[in-house]
Amino acid sequence: MLQYTLRRILVAVPSVLGVMIIVFAMVRLAPGDPAQNLAGEFADAETIELIRERFGLNEPTHVQFYRFVTGVLQGDLGTSTRTYRPVTTDLATFFPNTLELALGAITIALLFGIPSGILAALRPNSAFDLSVMIGALIGVSMPVFWFGLLAILIFSVQLGWFPVAGRGTLMHLVLPAITLGLSSMAIIARMTRSSMLEVLNQDFIRTARAKGLFDRGVVMKHALRNALVPVVTVIGLQFGALLAGAVITETVFSWPGIGRLLVDSIRARDYPVVQGAVLLIAVSFIVVNLVVDLVYGFIDPRIRYD
Amino acid sequence: MRNPVAIFGMVVIGFFLVIVVLAPFIAPYSPTEQNLRATYVPPGVGVALGGPEGQLGIWVHPVTRSPTAGLRVDDSVAYPVRLFVRGSEWTWFFGLVKSDLRLFGVDGPVRFYLLGTDEQGRDLLSRLVHGAWISLFIGLISIAIGIGVGVPAGAISGFLGGSTDMIVQRVIDTLLAFPGILLAIVLVATFGTGLTNVMIAVGVASVPIYARLVRGSVLQVKNREYVEAAAALGRNRLSTLARHVIPNVMAPIIVQSSLQMATAILFAAGLGFLGLGARPPQPEWGLMLARGREYLAVAPHVATFPGIAIVMVVLGFNLLGDALRDALDPRM
């Protein structure tokens, strides 16, 4: 297990490095002068020169990249060109809110996705199965922002059950979490169903049935454990998708998270914050997938020897 | 392909394609023509089933919005809606087709807003219909970029193996570290907003998905006897790859392309919604939805119809993709 853990961590390192290269390149590939981009639209010539000097933008690229990486490793992501706050402060303020939203979304997705997938698999081609599958297809086809707007229109504006926007109480979390979790719910339901169907057709289930175990015992004890193994991977991937999907959901619900920070910063061409937010989301995704890989190796030891 | 769900998907896509091809004929008005005296007209206002003297058909009363008194319907006059009317002239296919024939319109000096109007008094139906090609183009260009770059990269990576595979895989891993729409957002943030950049960004975001898919399929196929036979006959490796391996991994590529259409349309609409995509007054569906959001409480129809359009088209391609997968890949 230790060897497997180390190997997985080593595989993640080039990805993190690659992400840093892309984030580093963002400012330099953007049209216009990088110093101007970093300084902001209305900076005067003196400030631009200062920025150029401070960020070492007139030095060779590899030196710049080395500085960027050491800066990131020391927790220095630069300063916002809008608020003049350190980027890390902004990220530390907004990221927990995004995590809260993503955790709410994944909870809802699991709470509804897994049971409906299991029930659909137990009665394949029944009316229930069909409606779960059609519902799941509509779920993945629905634009997040449209579902969010409809939810606000119906449940906040018309019925007044939930607040329209913002973050605060648990009531504030309900609509954004459902909106963000919808497509994950659909994907998890589909995955659970197909994985469950596959397991239910295998020999050991037939043996369990032949032994005279009653149906629910078979399902709970033997099938479910095996069926949920691939679902774990999907949950990991979905968690990453949720972090990215939060960009849109947070805009719809005016949720003060990192996604909205990212969009606002892109519009304001506040590059240091854009870089920091992108880096944070991508690295979180890599870490989540690493953890999922490790969990996977733990629950299914065959994986470790792959 | 006798699956009713798949047929529904294909009907939706067919309908969508007909709208793209015949857009200016189906749309009663220009997508950008404003009428500031008729803003936020909800669908159905001023429309009557039956004429003033009991005639059959749809009749339209003049509708105006006054700044103080709100919407006013002038009941004293009514004009009939007719099929195949002559309206303002339009050109299509880059000026190749010219006509003034419209599928339907009002016989008289008023307008018939089937789906209502937006905040500038533009006809929502006309905007939706004229926006259809944008979604189709985004999907097609995204697939073209994904296949053009991702398929060769994945195929070469899987077929050659070794250090080539290592390097390509690390690049793909890096791109896949940007989940979902984030890679497209990163590209748009770098190279600027606008429709062209969105198409490229969504396309590039699909490259790692194709590359990984093709690599997996190539790995499955590359040790089959017919590939060995081609090598034994002295074919060089690239030509073996092109003539014997790629054709055998087409099925997953086709399935992925249908699903990719759906994803690309959703991503582009999402970018439009965030204000990072198409720019006003382009009738892009995501952008229309974003505008509608600002008037959600007063005019919910402005945000509702573009949403329905997106859901239908995306659902159509998802259904088709699913059905293709069932048909081409019985293992799933």
Image (cartoon, helix red, strand yellow):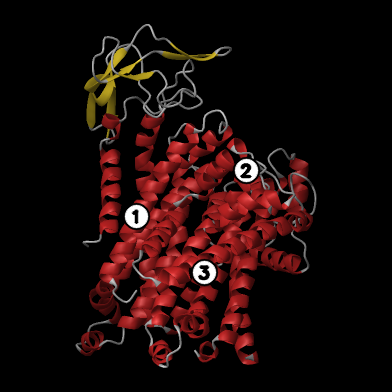
Give the percent coordinates (x, y) of residue A253: 63, 45
Q: Are marks 1 and 3 on the same chain?
A: no
| Three-letter code for the amino acid on which mark 1 is drawn | Phe
Name the residue nearer the viewer: A253 or B243. A253
Residue B8 in picture, x, y percent from top left: 28, 52
Can I make out residue A140 in this image? Answer: yes
Labels 2 and 3 share a subunit: yes
Q: Is A274 left or right of A197, judged from the image as shown?
A: right
User: Of the numbered discs in the image, which one, if any, rests on residue B317?
Assistant: 1
- Is residue B284 at all visible to an observer of this figure? no
Whether pointer 2 and pointer 1 mark residues with C-beta atoms closer than 8 Å, the reply is: no
Total marks placed: 3
- Give the foreground label among 2 and 1: 1
Q: Which residue is mark 2?
A: A267
Q: Secondary structure at mark 2?
A: helix
Mark 3: few/some/many CA within 10 Å (<14, 14-19, 20+): many
| Letter of the chain that mark 3 sits on in the rendering | A
Image position, residue B283 (x, y; %): 43, 35
SS type, badge 1: helix
Mark 3, residue position: A114
Give the mark toward the camera: 1 or 3.
3
Determine the chain carrying the residue at label 2. A
Kindly report the distance in space between the C-alpha atoms of the residues bearing marks 1 and 3: 25 Å
